[in-house]
């Protein structure tokens, strides 16, 4: 069973090397509204981009700060997230919510 978990993680990290996959993964995590989940997603994408040491060099952010920033209790500043994403070839953007189709209301006729 342990091998299945590590295989899943390895497959995930491999897929996150593709910038489109990484962006979709991070957007999905962000959409959940859970800070810990988003930080976990960032850690996984960071691992796919060579890990903390490589990203520290690319982003000019301190490696220990990166570990703290992306820890479960991390509370990164927006500029740190933007810098980290840039080092991974990604960017942060805000988009309008898509309008949901209005549900058709059925009125009871007496």
Image (cartoon, rainbow, N blue to C red):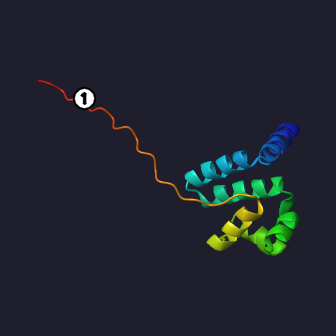
- Circle 1: element type: loop
The location of residue 25, given as percent across then percent down, is 67, 48
Residue 77 in view of the camera? no
Residue 107 left/right relative to 40: left
Q: Report the number of numbered marks.
A: 1
Q: Which residue position holds label 1? A: 106
- The residue positioned 65% from the left and 47% from the top of the image is 24
Q: Does residue 61 sit above or below 14 in this rendering?
A: below
> Toward the viewer: 25 or 72?
25
**Viewer-nearest residue: 1 or 78:** 78
Percent from the top left, x then y, of residue 60? 81, 74
Residue visible at 45% across and 46% down in the picture: 98
Seen at 81% across and 47% down, the residue is: 13
Image location (x, y in percent) of residue 45: 76, 54
Closer to the camera, 6 or 2? Answer: 6
Q: Quadrant of the N terminus?
A: top right
Crowd band around label 1 with a 10 angstrom C-alpha radius: few (<14), some (14–19), many (20+): few
Whole-percent x, y for residue 21 in the image: 71, 45
In-front residue for pair 32/101: 101
Question: Is 92 on the left or on the right of 53, as rendered?
Answer: left
């Amino acid at each position: 069973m342990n091998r299945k978990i590590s295989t899943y993680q390895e497959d995930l990290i491999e897929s996150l090397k593709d910038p489109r996959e990484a962006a979709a993964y991070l957007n999905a995590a962000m959409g959940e509204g859970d800070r810990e989940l988003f930080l976990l997603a960032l850690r996984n994408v960071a691992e796919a981009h060579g890990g903390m040491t490589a990203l520290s060099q690319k982003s000019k952010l301190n490696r220990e700060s990166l570990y703290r920033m992306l820890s479960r209790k991390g509370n990164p500043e927006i500029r740190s997230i933007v810098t980290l994403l840039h080092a991974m070839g990604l960017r942060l953007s805000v988009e309008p919510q898509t309008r949901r189709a209005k549900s058709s209301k059925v009125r009871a006729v007496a």
